[in-house]
Image (cartoon, rainbow, N blue to C red):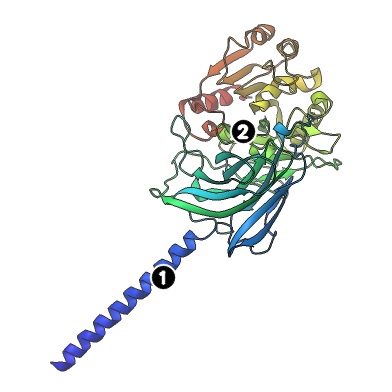
């Protein structure tokens, strides 16, 4: 009897020991998840990516803070107007190799203290990957003030489409806007609040990330034209079913203008942001090339505007890219479609119909949320009407645009051109609609298949 009681006490002690151990492990995991989201960045500046400012870690009262110092205008590449209202500087904290564990997290938060003498607009961004955009929170920070910013990882577009996948964040970015000088201290970059476990939409496409290396089927790569020693590049995607002797339609695409507004839009202005071509093809049956706007004066990609020489240099670069794709990678010259969103949609006409040489490349256009003649920068309605007469393709697919606004352009286009006007239903200035299976996308894919029939 005594032995049985002794054994029972030992068993209970063992159970209590392991239960306590499990609780301790759970507590350690909770502590890890509650840690700062930059804990994987070990050195003072290593791993951080900066534009237009200096960033360094420091210690304040035992807490790690990130000190940001901006000493002058930080204009987007290609922006020719030295206006502080267009200044944008940032520091980017990349995701750890294994990613952040955010599948059940609601917010990413940070505390920002203005320790300088100038006010600044400060935005905290949680930036998605694989074609997802970003969510942000913004505040006007006055000298001496301390503010908390919170990015809602479950924020949605008006139609209910999630803005980001919280399990696929690429970076967290702290951005300073609309000022020439600022000194800030960022602290407590953490998670806050719980949310139901994330379940990704079942019909959403994941856009391949741009990598370096030669083009291969199913890969999206940074591609530089032979002999071009500038920083300009395009992003080339060969479809999964690509073969060396095959002939494939080409979807060329221009990106939107650089624009960062937590309440309106996230747009980098760079080729890798494009998604329309992948949404149309779903990765098969067509070559997709994402084009830059080119600034030959600076030797860079123009994140803002149409590029140097009022867009002539972008047009010349585009012609070379299409020739390269058709000559080397099996692009079908008879079936080349030009597409674009926002600035990119305007560029379909403003760049794509700039002269007879480039206008002769296109069989069709896909333009979303703007078009040539929008009176944005150099694109006037008068110029758009003149350019429209150069279109030699068969069809133009317009998304979220008003046919009444562009009636003069339609009237100037050859009468046999087939115009299609669709509404995406997204209700926002973003490209998320191209990556799901909504009715507009099903119609766009059928349209593309019909016009690209040899």
Q: Is residue 133 visible?
A: no
Task: Give x and y (percent) for residue 165.
Answer: 50, 45
Answer left or right for 217 relative to 5: right
Q: Quadrant of residue 117?
A: top right
Q: In the picture, which quadrant includes the N terminus?
A: bottom left
Front-lying residue, 187 or 295: 187
Q: How many marks?
A: 2
Q: In the picture, which quadrant includes the C terminus?
A: top right
Toward the bottom, the furthest residue is: 2
Q: Which mark is residue 277?
A: 2
> Does 35 sit above or below residue 120?
below
Name the residue carrying label 1.
25
Residue at (67, 17) in percent of width and height: 374
Answer left or right for 193 relative to 235: left
Give SS at disc 1: helix
Assess disc 1: are there few (<14), some (14-19) or many (≥20) residues with their C-alpha within 10 Å of its C-alpha. few
Assess disc 2: are there few (<14), some (14-19) or many (≥20) residues with their C-alpha within 10 Å of its C-alpha. many
Task: Give x and y (percent) for residue 382.
Answer: 73, 10
Task: Give x and y (percent) for residue 325.
Answer: 74, 35
């Amino acid at each position: 009897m005594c032995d049985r009681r002794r054994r029972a006490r030992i068993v209970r002690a063992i159970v209590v020991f392991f239960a306590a151990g499990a609780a301790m492990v759970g507590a350690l995991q909770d502590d890890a998840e509650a840690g700062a989201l930059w804990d994987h960045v070990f050195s003072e500046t290593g791993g951080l990516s900066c534009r237009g400012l200096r960033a360094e870690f420091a210690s304040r009262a035992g807490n790690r803070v990130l000190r940001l110092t901006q000493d002058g205008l930080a204009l987007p590449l290609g922006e020719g107007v030295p206006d502080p209202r267009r200044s944008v500087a940032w520091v980017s904290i990349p995701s750890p190799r294994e990613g952040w564990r955010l599948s059940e997290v609601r917010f990413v938060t940070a505390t920002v203290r203005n320790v300088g003498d100038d006010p600044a607009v400060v935005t905290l961004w949680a930036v998605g990957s694989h074609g997802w955009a970003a969510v942000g929170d913004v505040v006007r920070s006055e000298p001496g003030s301390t503010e908390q910013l919170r990015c809602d990882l479950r924020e949605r577009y008006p139609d209910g489409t999630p803005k980001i996948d919280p399990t696929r964040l690429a970076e967290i970015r702290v951005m300073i806007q609309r000022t020439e000088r600022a000194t800030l201290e960022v602290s407590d970059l953490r998670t806050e609040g719980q949310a139901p476990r994330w379940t990704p939409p079942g019909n959403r496409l994941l856009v391949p990330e741009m990598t370096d290396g030669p083009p291969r089927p199913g890969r999206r790569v940074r591609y530089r034209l032979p002999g071009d020693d500038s920083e300009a590049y395009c992003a080339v995607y060969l479809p999964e079913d690509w073969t060396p002797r095959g002939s494939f339609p080409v979807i060329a695409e221009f990106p939107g203008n650089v624009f960062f507004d937590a309440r309106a839009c996230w747009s980098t202005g760079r080729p890798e942001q494009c998604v329309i071509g992948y949404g149309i093809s779903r990765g098969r049956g067509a070559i997709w090339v994402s084009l830059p706007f080119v600034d030959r004066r600076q030797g860079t990609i123009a994140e803002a505007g149409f590029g140097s020489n009022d867009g002539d240099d972008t047009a010349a670069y585009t012609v070379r890219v299409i020739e390269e794709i058709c000559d080397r990678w099996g692009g079908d010259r008879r079936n080349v479609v030009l597409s674009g969103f926002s600035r990119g949609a305007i560029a379909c006409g403003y760049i794509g119909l700039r002269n007879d040489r480039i206008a002769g490349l296109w069989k069709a256009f896909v333009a979303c949320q703007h078009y040539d003649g929008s009176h944005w920068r150099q694109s006037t309605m008068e110029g758009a009407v003149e350019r429209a007469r150069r279109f030699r393709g068969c069809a133009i697919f317009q998304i979220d645009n008003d046919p009444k606004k562009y009636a003069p352009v339609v009237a100037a286009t050859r009468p046999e051109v087939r115009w299609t006007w669709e509404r995406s239903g997204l209700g926002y200035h973003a490209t998320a609609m191209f990556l799901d299976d909504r009715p507009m996308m099903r119609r766009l894919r059928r349209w593309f298949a019909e016009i690209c029939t040899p």
